[in-house]
Image: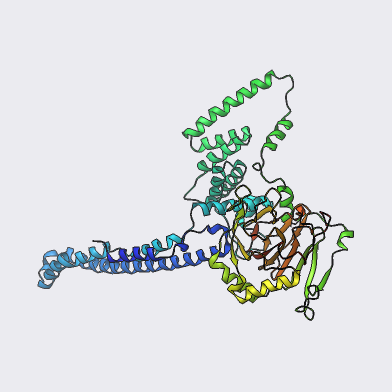
Amino acid sequence: MMPTKLWCLLILCVLLPSSYGHTDFFTSIGHMTDLINTEKDLVTSLKDYIRAEESKLEQIKKWAEKLDKLTDTATKDPEGFLGHPVNAFKLMKRLNTEWSELENLVLKDMSDGFISNMTIQRQYFPNDEDQTGAAKALLRLQDTYNLDTDTISRGNLPGVKHKTFLTAEDCFELGKIAYTEADYYHTELWMEQALKQLDDGEVSSSINKVSILDYLSYAVYQQGDLDKAVMLTKRLLELEPDHQRANGNMKYFEYIISKEKEKEANKSVVQSDEETAAMVKTQKKRPKDYLPERHKYEMLCRGEGLKMTPRRQKKLFCRYSDGNRNPRYILGPVKQEDEWDRPRIVRFLEIISDDEIETVKELAKPRLSRATVHDPQTGKLTTAHYRVSKSAWLSGYEHPVIARINTRIQDLTGLDVSTAEELQVANYGVGGQYEPHFDFGRKDEPDAFKELGTGNRIATWLFYMSDVAAGGATVFPEVGASVWPQKGTAVFWYNLFPSGEGDYSTRHAACPVLVGNKWVSNKWIHERGQEFRRPCTLSELD
């Protein structure tokens, strides 16, 4: 018959809401905070188990000490000891009853409570996809912000509050994940870091130099550096001469070297050592990229963007804005400053309060789900590796704060938000980003917003609801603009010209968050309802 405890556990697991299951933890720092509480609960449960085991061992220890003294006395004079009738009775009692009780105590499993809690909490745990996603995020941050492996391993990142470091095992794991993606560039970097840390004296019980060298030599070979691959394989064989794969690789490498020497001998012009080294060096680079503006995008994320000429800078101003004489702001105008001129990007300062931000986050957090993008092929929403965040949608009728925010956007932009999309709240995950994209539908995406029936996205309003310690800028690669997060502010720009044509200079991206937690919310305003608020012009670019 099934124990009552197990029945209760099964019933509890069935009754727990399905929404508590796995939810792409790595895509949202906000949701990952729940994992901290889960782990804290497990630690508390583990400590309870340890105390129970210690109590049990203490009882056994006292029993052993008592019997140790008793048996020492008894074995010195067995007959004399048993001549006392009480001693004889107690011996019978101990062996017949008390030793059985001790046996039961020894066999008693004190881990039931911890195992039950572990079983319940396991459904909250991240899975392999989360671990891989977090690892890829570290590689993305390494590339975007030009960080070397030693800097990341030592935790020397800008703006960190809680410094931590990577063990050799952690570095090995990062290298393995890169290896499974056939990313031999990052495999080499992280396997070398793991090897360096072991060479520097770090002790690891789970990995060794042989395993690291096995991956490292192959990764180096795949990048065309045969000499280094041979050197690493020789070092591996010094540690483990019978390593089957390394011996096979060594024979193969020697065969390739001999063939290369034959080719060189037959050539009339032999490459210099410098030329050969240069050729090998150029082969060692990041994997091929699908993003044409990757280099410019990453430079902007690092704050290395184009600098405006003094002449253009002089045309940027800060001002008090009353929303074009809006009655709500005539007596209390808001601070506004120009971030960029073409396209015109303006920032509103102190435009959302801390209390409003917390309300928005509280409303959004239970609904956060993996952020999606429009698939131009199908016209449907789908997740994408280039957008790492979670989002939720909030309507004005749900809460007075959301209604107030919508009204504020309408008053300050002069645009009708009744046809706009709901307020989208986004929280970025580990290395969270949204690579360069357009907010508006292009001509090759005629059905992008067809189901809404409100036309194209004419403008974007973006609230920054948190400061970010490092990274997380909004960048515009086409024009070289970088807009940095500042809590309580919002930026606004038009995606379409007054003619209705798309402004391709508004292609923008959310840079990976290096350190910190990035919360934003945005309002996509559509064409319908703006006919008299922003009339069309005869020129396509006006």
Quadrant of the image occupied by residue 11: bottom left
Would you say 272 lies left or right of 286 here?
Answer: right
Colour pattern: rainbow
* Residue 222 sits above or below residue 154 on the image: above
Quarter of the image with the C terminus in it: bottom right
Would you say 48 lies left or right of 108 here?
Answer: right
- Locate residue 507, reporting x and y percent: 73, 54
Quadrant of the image occupied by residue 67: bottom left
- Locate residue 183, reporting x and y percent: 59, 42
- Locate residue 294, reporting x and y percent: 70, 48
- Locate residue 537, reporting x and y percent: 82, 59
Evaluate whether residue 416 shows in this view. yes
Quarter of the image with the N terminus in it: bottom left
* Residue 441 sits above or below residue 60 on the image: above
Quadrant of the image occupied by residue 528: bottom right
For the view shown, which residue lies furthest in the right direction? 311
Would you say 529 lies left or right of 185 here?
Answer: right
Evaluate whether residue 202 shows in this view. no
- Foreground residue, 367 or 255? 367
- Foreground residue, 37 or 238? 37
- Foreground residue, 127 or 19? 19
Number of labelled discs?
0
Residue depicted at x 67% and y 63%: 159
- Foreground residue, 108 or 459? 459
